[in-house]
Image (cartoon, helix red, strand yellow):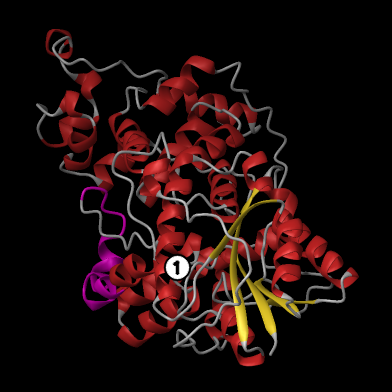
Amino acid sequence: MTTAVVLFTSDLRLHDHPPLCAALARHDRIVPLFVRDRGIADAGFDVPNRRAFLADCLADLDDGLHARGGHLVVRSGDVVEEVCEVAREADAAEVHMAAGVSGYARTREERLGVALGERGLGLAVHDAVVTAVPPGAVVPTGSAGADHFAVFTPYARRWAQESLRSPLHAPRSVTVPDGVRTEEVPARDEVAGVSPALARGGEKTGRRRMNAWLRGPVGAYEDQHDDLAGDSTSRLSPHLHFGTLSAAEVVHRARRVGGAGADAFVRQVCWRDFHHQVLAARPAAADHNYRDKGDSWRTEEEAGCEVEAWRSGLTGYPVVDAAMRQLRHEGWMHNRGRLLTASFLAKTLYVDWRVGARHFLDLLVDGDVANNQLNWQWVAGTGNDTRPNRVLNPVRQALRYDPGGSYVRRWVPELAGLEGAAVHEPWKLPARERATYDYPEPIVALDDGLARFRQARGLAD
């Protein structure tokens, strides 16, 4: 009778789980293991919103395993040390896990492979678990030494031609050996500082949301995904980040639905894979400019009051403030809001993109190193945007994507009395009327911010 350890990381599900299915096919027993990684906490990535969502995911995963005759083993500490100790306790022959993308994840895999090898044990690392198409599977042709696509559109064309693996069924039964020490599965109510309206986590919740999304709302996605007030997005990003849903299965299911809305939605999954393949090829992009534009960004110390106003949703630009308040309240933000708030900080205020990226990672439940950092770089003009000097005007963005002002009135109740599009420019009200609203004046004139950015980039007037 043989045993394998299945190390869960960003793949907290039982459906379409290649490492789990491979281990069950080769061994009589498995140890489903999750390690509360000390390195993640030391890096400041273990923040309340993601910790609470993770607790939901682990509880749901444990429930799913119990229903199949097993249970989840939870440990805390250094991943390599804990996996090796669990393997020893279970007398396991090998360990299965999903391939990571970030520099940290890949170093962790290398360390684990060496440590297990020294003990005569094997490590099987499985691709296409976290993403639909594995990083490195699609590379440019005709470019000597090119190891990734730097521009999205040609990547998307090639990505669409790839044959995705078929989704795997969840196992019917799981046998876990006795004698393996485990901690209690963490609970959400043990976590302090969680956003009041943080969504629930877990595979069952994720699959219900995916099914409901694909049954109807996805059909309007192409036309409505930028509508701030309509909130017509899938909200599946936290489940893709924690792996309670399989990106490959989501793409397969959406393609079966078909239509312009489903196609536009699949394109967003492709964007996710695009950023993962960029980070896999250039792990330093998590902290350093992918393309150096020679910016002398203002630091947080230099722009302290303005940065704090941005974080607090008190910039004087209602749509920016609405999005930042949504982030704090829900631990999530509409994608259009992410773009315009990032542009406001990095280009209008000309503050280092890393300041904003860190704040997003502090609050976003779907805070993902690949997508968060590289989307920030895209907006800041140091990443993969083919128009790196574009600056999003928050007023124009508001008038286009929240024309009636409903999104702003929802999140900036101080301005709820302003009707229609007038809510987007309260500074244009007569002075006497402005005084009746407890809302700040703009912290910077848009023309001044644009001029500063263009001067810093050496752009002609």
Residue closest to the eye, 399 or 167: 167
Asked if residue 388 lies in the magenta stretch, the reply is: no
Q: Position of residue 350 (x, y in %)?
A: 56, 28
Nearer the observer, 133 or 229: 133
Q: Tell me if 449 is positioned left or right of 208 in this view.
A: right
Secondary element under disc 1, as helix, strand or loop, is helix
Magenta span of residues = 211-229
Q: Main secondary structure of the magenta part?
A: helix
Q: Is 120 situated above or below 338?
A: below
Q: Which residue is pictured at 68% across the width and 79% down the height?
A: 4
Residue 144 location, x and y as percent?
Answer: 84, 73
Q: Depth check: give the residue in front, 448 or 195.
A: 195
Q: Is residue 367 above or below residue 257?
A: above
Measured as percent of width and height from the top left, residue 410 is found at 19, 37
Residue at x 18% of width, y 34% of height: 409
Q: Residues within 10 Å of mark 1 (few under 14, many from 20)?
A: many
- Look at the image and tell me in which quarter the C terminus lies: top right
Q: Is residue 225 magenta?
A: yes
Is 166 left, or right, of 332 in this rendering? right
Q: Kindly give the residue lying farthest to the front in the view shown.
A: 179
* Residue type, label 1: Leu
Residue carrying label 1: 61
